[in-house]
Image: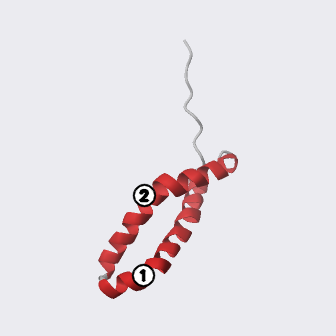
Amino acid sequence: MVSVQPPPRPNRHKMTFLTWVGIWPLITSILWLLLPTLLAHFPLPVVTLIVTAMVVPLMSYVVMPALIRMAGPWLMR
């Protein structure tokens, strides 16, 4: 019988850093583009809702997969 080993997991500290590397410019860009327009028309909780509704899918499906591919060897060291 052959035992199957699960794939190694990246270091939690490196994944946290990589998440920050992706989320900081993404939030900054979205706020820079949309904040003047949104704050003029909506209260802060609604602005936060709109920004997070954009950031979370972008991070999950676009930014993090790209960052993980680029940083793959570093993550597994």
User: Closer to the camera, 33 or 48?
Assistant: 33
Q: Which residue is mark 2?
A: 57
* Whole-number angstrom distance, CA of label 2 to CA of label 1: 19 Å
Compared with residue 2, is residue 75 higher up or lower down, i.e. above or below? below
Q: Which residue is mark 1?
A: 35
State the residue at coordinates (42%, 57%).
57
Label 2: element kind: helix
Is 55 in front, or is 73? 55
Where does residue 31 sit, x and y in percent of width and height? 46, 77
Q: Position of residue 13 (x, y in %)?
A: 59, 56
In this view, the residue in front, 37 or 21, is 37
Going 56% across and 15% down the picture, which residue do you hit?
2
Q: Quadrant of residue 18?
A: bottom right
In the depicted structure, whether residue 56 falls above or below residue 50:
above
Classify 10 Å Cα crowding around label 2: few (below 14), some (14-19), many (20 and above): few
* Mark 1 Cα shell of 10 Å, populated few (<14), some (14-19), many (≥20): some
Circle on res. 17: none
Which residue is rendered at x = 55% and y = 20% of the image? Answer: 3
Q: Foreground residue, 73 or 29?
A: 29
